Image (cartoon, helix red, strand yellow):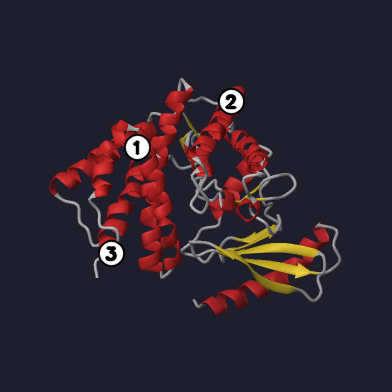
Amino acid sequence: MSVDSRLDGLKAWLEECLPAVCAARGWAAPGEARLSPASSDASFRRYFRWEEGERSLIVMDAPPPQEDCRPFVKVAGLLASAGVHVPEILTADLEQGYLLLPDLGRQTYLDVIDENNADALFEDALEALVAFQRLPVEGLLPSYDEALLRRELQLFPDWYLARHLGVTLDGEALAAWERICTRLIDSALAQPRVLVHRDYMPRNLMQSRPNPGVLDFQDAVFGPVTYDVTCLFKDAFLSWPQARVETWLRRYWQRAQAAGILLPESFEAFQQASDLMGVQRHLKVIGIFARICHRDGKPRYLGDVPRFFAYLDEVIARRPELAELGELLARLPKEPAA
């Protein structure tokens, strides 16, 4: 099905469902409205903004079979039950992959955050994070288990090394990579487990009332407690000085402890677990960005790969247990072969 026919189908669906949605919200019947792109992401999902005067809604287009809206609906309900500000599902056609949502605003954290307002914005983000980490979700969400952690790590050698750089690991290099993966996976599996958003970062947090509005949560799992807070401060598109990150991590540690969330036994153990969790994510994201480039024809994401290598270098420099990873990365070519 072509992009144009998806859009035609979406418009027809809107014409059918909007009168009832407007009536439920106490709005007059819809008249002349404008449908414009709101955002897109690295997946097949697209978002459109429906506007008529001061009225505004968001339409999600998630084409089957590439995307499944049901996890989005399920996780939205879980997060809302914890008081987290997520889009309400106004109406949906799950078979076609269309959802109609409230408009949480036009500015993400990434759009507005700077060194002066970061403390306040992140304080709100930590409040929401701790709220949903308290949810009892074991058995309700997929488990962030060894198989998933290992599949994610394998994206790095498969897509960044082999596909992008033309490098194949073998012999001692392959053995070293397998030891590194085992260390990272063992650390992740040893942590207390909570609801994990998996992309809890400024681009997926809207500046809104109440703040923040939380988006892009459909891939949530039951997994390591350090994952989301590490993701928040070691972002794909924004970097902070390590000293400031440590201050924010300690603030999370205090909040989470006060909320009764299980954590590693000391802040030092928590920070070590966060560092190793971050390394797992950084390697995965580098692989994903290479896959998006070479499989999906979206090369712009590769521009942020150096940020993730910088995160890796910083952690490797102060974690002796990652020396083997440092040696492996140091031997890689800086650019793809001609």
Kind of residue indicated by mark 2: Gln
Residue at horizontal 43 percent and vertical 39 percent from the top? 143
Kind of residue indicated by mark 3: Pro
Give the residue at the far left of this rendering: 171
Q: Residue 136 versus residue 262: which sits nearer the camera? A: 262
Is label 2 or label 3 in front? 3
Query: Dot 2 corresponds to which residue?
Result: 254
Is label 1 or label 3 in front? 1
Question: Dot 1: what SS?
Answer: helix
Mark seen at residue 317: 1
Is residue 220 shown above or below 97?
above
Question: Dot 3: what SS?
Answer: loop
Kind of residue indicated by mark 1: Ala
Estimate the x, y position of residue 19 in percent, counting from the top left.
78, 67
Is residue 135 shown above or below 68?
above
Estimate the x, y position of residue 192 in percent, counting from the top left.
46, 28
Query: Dot 3 corresponds to which residue?
Result: 336
- How many marks the image carries: the answer is 3
Residues at badges 2 and 1 in contact (C-beta under 8 Å)? no
**How far apart are the two marked residues, 2 and 1, measured between alpha carbons?**
26 Å
Quadrant in which the C terminus is drawn: bottom left
Mark 1 or mark 3: which comes first in sequence? 1
Q: Quadrant of residue 105?
A: bottom right
